[in-house]
């Protein structure tokens, strides 16, 4: 089985390393030469790809529009599995399935990362115990889907989450994209300028992902704009409710508002199931 990873950043490099750890030989490709040179010199990849017609599996680890441009502009082997790792799925899936292809497409999204980027920070253990989301639809090739499931387990992921692209984009707007937006907005308060010595774990948790790469994340937000905008509106409503309770000076009202959030959060941990989602425990997940 010949595998190639196109896009050798943190995630792409870690895909290569986790697959190599599992016994696969992996080639690589990158838009700029420096990461490719680093990957070759450090044994992260076997060789660089000059064309993609010889590969059975191609992972595309590029930003959304670059991913689509790559898929549309590349010749793949007949029957190959092409899988992107973008943080938005509907945008890619709709375009790929809009016309006949000679390859099978299955979207995936590794739910793992670091605060730093670049192949220099890639590691074989990045996905150990993490969740992998795989999206599929009526157009998805069942054999290709099974191949990606097997590779997910081989790379060390702890859980496999399967759902539609629509469900993925709705969920990720809340669990990832809104979290980054809130963190980015939080640090725009003027108090950020002189808070040394006043910070603890809560501050670190709130600000850890504030320093987003605006080029990468703006593309993700805009390709999932309807979901992201809806989640922002919901958050504004909740914040306004809390602000109103604080402004009222009514302790009972404020306690009630805060309690409703606590109860919802606690219940979410007890009833975390959905007919829209399939969860399979793989390696070392609790």
Image (spheres, helix red, strand yellow):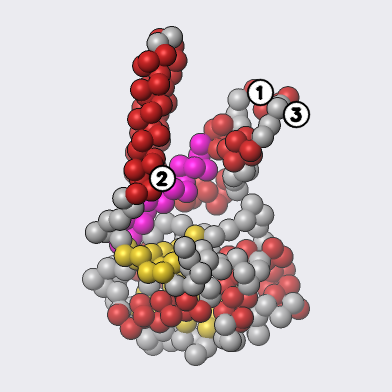
- Residue in the picture at 30% in, 79% down: 141
User: SS at mark 2?
Assistant: helix
Residue mark closest to the camera, 3 vs 1: 3
Residue 105: x, y in percent?
A: 37, 74
Up the image or down, 93 lies above or below 79; here it is above
The residue under the point 38% across, 41% down is 266
Query: Please, is residue 56 above or below residue 261 in the view?
Result: below
Q: Earlier in the sequence, mark 2 or mark 1?
A: 2
Which residue is identified by label 1? Answer: 191
Residue at image point 40% right, 11% down:
250
Whole-percent x and y of residue 98?
29, 67
Residues at marks 3 and 1, CA–CA distance in whole angstroms: 12 Å
Question: For mark 3, what is the residue?
Answer: 197
Q: Is residue 38 above or below residue 172?
A: below
Q: Quadrant of residue 260?
A: top left
Q: Position of residue 121 (x, y in %)?
A: 69, 63
Residue matched to label 2:
174
Mark 2: few/some/many CA within 10 Å (<14, 14-19, 20+) = some
Count of numbered marks: 3
Q: Which residues are magenta?
A: 164-182
Regarding mark 1 in the picture, which secondary structure is present there? helix
Q: Alpha carbon of mark 2 to alpha carbon of mark 3: how far?
A: 31 Å
What's the residue at 47%, 63% (across, down)?
286
Separation (CA) of disc 2 from disc 1 = 26 Å
Tell me if 31 is positioned left or right of 62 in this view.
right
The tag on residue 93 is none
* First-in-chain label (2 vs 3): 2
Q: Is residue 179 magenta?
A: yes
């Amino acid at each position: 089985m010949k595998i190639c990873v196109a896009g050798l950043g943190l995630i792409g490099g870690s895909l290569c390393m986790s697959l190599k750890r599992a016994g696969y030989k992996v080639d690589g490709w990158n838009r700029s030469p420096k990461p490719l040179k680093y990957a070759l010199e450090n044994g992260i990849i076997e060789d660089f790809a000059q064309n993609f017609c010889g590969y059975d599996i191609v992972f595309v680890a590029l930003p959304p529009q670059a991913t689509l441009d790559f898929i549309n502009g590349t010749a793949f082997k007949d029957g190959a599995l092409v899988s992107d790792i973008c943080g938005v799925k509907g945008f890619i899936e709709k375009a790929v399935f809009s016309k006949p292809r000679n390859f099978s497409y299955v979207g995936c999204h590794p739910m793992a990362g670091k605060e730093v980027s670049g192949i220099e920070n890639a590691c074989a253990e990045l996905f150990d115990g993490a969740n992998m989301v795989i999206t599929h639809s009526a157009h998805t090739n069942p054999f290709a889907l099974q191949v990606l499931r097997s590779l997910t387990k081989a790379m060390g992921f702890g859980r496999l989450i399967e759902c539609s692209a629509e469900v993925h984009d709705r969920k990720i707007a809340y669990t990832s994209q809104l979290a980054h937006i809130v963190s980015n907005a939080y640090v725009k308060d003027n108090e950020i300028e002189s808070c040394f010595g006043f910070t603890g774990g809560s501050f670190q948790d709130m600000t850890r992902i504030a320093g987003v790469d605006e080029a990468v994340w703006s593309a993700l937000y805009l390709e999932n704009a309807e979901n992201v905008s809806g989640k922002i509106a919901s958050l504004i409503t909740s914040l306004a409710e809390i602000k109103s309770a604080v402004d009222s000076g009514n302790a009972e009202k404020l306690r009630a508002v805060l309690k409703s959030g606590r109860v919802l959060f606690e219940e979410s941990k007890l009833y975390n199931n959905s007919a829209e989602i399939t969860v399979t425990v793989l390696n070392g997940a609790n």
